Image: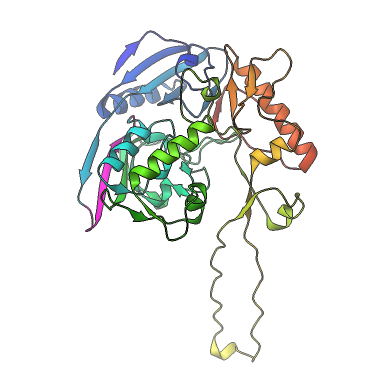
């Protein structure tokens, strides 16, 4: 662990906002990371872990605590079932570098998540995903430094409560995580498919890539096409492109009941979620009276497009409030961007305005996707 002179968090986050912390340390090995956090927790100081800084909106006031910069790197191959490869990846390893490595090695399972900014350790926290792929599909386990015990333990993916952009570790706006800790490494299990053309599974991915159901393409083609698609939307980091000075999608696509979805305009894009399997009803023979209770009809929840709701609430691409240096991306209505020197207060003001417009128009309160530190909406 190396203590360094604190710098503004605006220099370490993709939204380019955030004050100067009281203390800053850098961890380049897992031992340094574990040691730093144990020391901070023992002292009872406020703490904040920063990896790629791509999913954070941090307030303008100084952070009265210690910021831990996670700079660990490394990919290790582990034994796996035939036709599969397991990769253990250090938490600070750049996510897109990991995807590039997997594609170069002919390993399938995360190629559609090319171009997502941030670190590997942050990926399970909000179950990152894109174009129909999510990390829940390939994540085996994580090594977690648990704040309650100060010990590193192996936690199976099934115990992380992975859902749509959520987990038990995520700090949702207005709530605390159900479990407090820091991921030290992640383990993924990928399919070994090589560099030739393979069938593309997943309707959402085929639609995004404009592929026919029986189309076969290489992992490299998928990665290149996803990167190009994201770049058009301003979703690949580029210092020269102000539309990428963002936290990606600032608001989550909303998950609503089927009945609420029917109140929205028919043109609003929506995707029914997979229904849960109904439990089997078992009636003891001694209690059977010849009548079988009718099945309960349930409709799956529906994911609706937050971008569509924003634009149809009258807040279009490029919108900004008067005299504000924060604006919606000119390419994507879900991205709040810093157009140069915007404060966290300006970004929050724009986010609140968008929430109010959508709620007034459609009766739905959009929820922020980034973690907010020292900021209120």
Residue 82 part of the magenta segment: yes
Where is the N terminus found, in terms of image quarters?
top left
Using residue 240 as the reference point, say whether residue 26 is left or right of it: left
Question: Measured from the top left, where is residue 247 in percent x and y?
Answer: 53, 28
* Residue appearing at x 41%, y 46% in the figure: 135
- Residue 286 visible? The answer is yes
Q: Most extreme residue toward the top, as rendered?
A: 5
Name the foreground residue: 121 vs 75: 75
Residue 144 part of the magenta segment: no
Question: Measured from the top left, where is residue 373 in percent x and y?
Answer: 55, 24
Q: Is residue 323 above or below residue 46?
A: above
* Residue appearing at x 44%, y 20% in the figure: 45
Q: Quadrant of residue 27?
A: top left
Q: Is residue 110 above or below residue 215?
A: above
Q: Quadrant of residue 279?
A: bottom right
Using residue 121 as the reference point, say whether residue 289 is left or right of it: right
The colour scheme used here is: rainbow
Name the foreground residue: 191 vs 118: 191
Where is the C terminus found, in terms of image quarters?
top right
Question: Measured from the top left, where is residue 336 in percent x and y?
Answer: 60, 26
Using residue 240 as the reference point, say whether residue 365 is left or right of it: right
Q: Most extreme residue toward the right, as rendered?
A: 360
Q: How many marks?
A: 0
Q: Is residue 329 above or below residue 145?
A: above
- Residue 161 visible? The answer is no
Q: Which residues are magenta?
A: 80-92
Question: Measured from the top left, where is residue 203 in percent x and y?
Answer: 50, 56
């Amino acid at each position: 662990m190396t203590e360094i002179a604190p710098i503004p968090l605006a220099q370490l986050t993709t939204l380019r906002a955030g004050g100067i912390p009281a203390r800053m340390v850098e961890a380049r090995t897992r031992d340094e990371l574990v040691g730093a956090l144990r020391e901070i927790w023992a002292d009872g100081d406020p703490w904040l872990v920063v990896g790629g800084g791509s999913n954070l909106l941090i307030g303008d006031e100084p952070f009265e605590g210690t910021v831990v910069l996670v700079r660990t790197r490394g990919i290790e191959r582990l034994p796996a079932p035939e036709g599969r490869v397991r990769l253990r990846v250090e938490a600070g390893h750049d996510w897109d570098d990991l995807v590039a490595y997997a594609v170069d090695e002919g390993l399938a399972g995360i190629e559609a998540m090319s171009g997502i900014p941030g670190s590997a350790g942050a990926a399970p926290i909000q179950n990152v995903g894109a174009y129909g792929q999510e990390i829940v599909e390939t994540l085996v386990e994580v090594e977690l430094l648990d704040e309650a015990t100060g010990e590193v333990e192996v936690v199976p993916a099934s115990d992380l409560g992975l859902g749509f952009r959520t987990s038990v570790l995520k700090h949702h706006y207005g709530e605390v995580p159900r479990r407090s800790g820091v991921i030290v490494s992640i383990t993924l299990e990928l399919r070994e498919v090589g560099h030739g053309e393979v069938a593309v599974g997943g309707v959402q991915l085929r639609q995004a890539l404009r592929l026919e159901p029986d189309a076969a393409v290489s992992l490299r083609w998928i990665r290149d096409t996803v990167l190009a698609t994201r770049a058009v939307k301003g979703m690949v980091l580029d210092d020269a492109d102000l539309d990428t000075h963002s936290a990606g999608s600032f608001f989550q696509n909303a998950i609503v009941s089927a009945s609420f979805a029917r109140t929205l305009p028919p043109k609003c894009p929506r995707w029914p979620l997979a229904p849960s399997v109904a439990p089997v009803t078992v009636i003891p023979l001694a209690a059977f009276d010849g009548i079988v209770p009718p099945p309960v009809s349930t409709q799956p929840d529906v994911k609706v497009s937050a971008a569509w709701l924003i634009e149809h609430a009258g807040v279009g691409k490029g919108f900004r409030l008067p005299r504000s240096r924060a604006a919606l991306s000119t390419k994507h209505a879900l991205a709040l961007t810093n157009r140069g020197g915007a404060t966290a207060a300006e970004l929050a003001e724009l986010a609140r305005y968008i929430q109010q417009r959508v709620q007034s128009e459609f009766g739905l309160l959009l929820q922020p996707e980034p973690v907010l530190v020292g900021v209120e909406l």
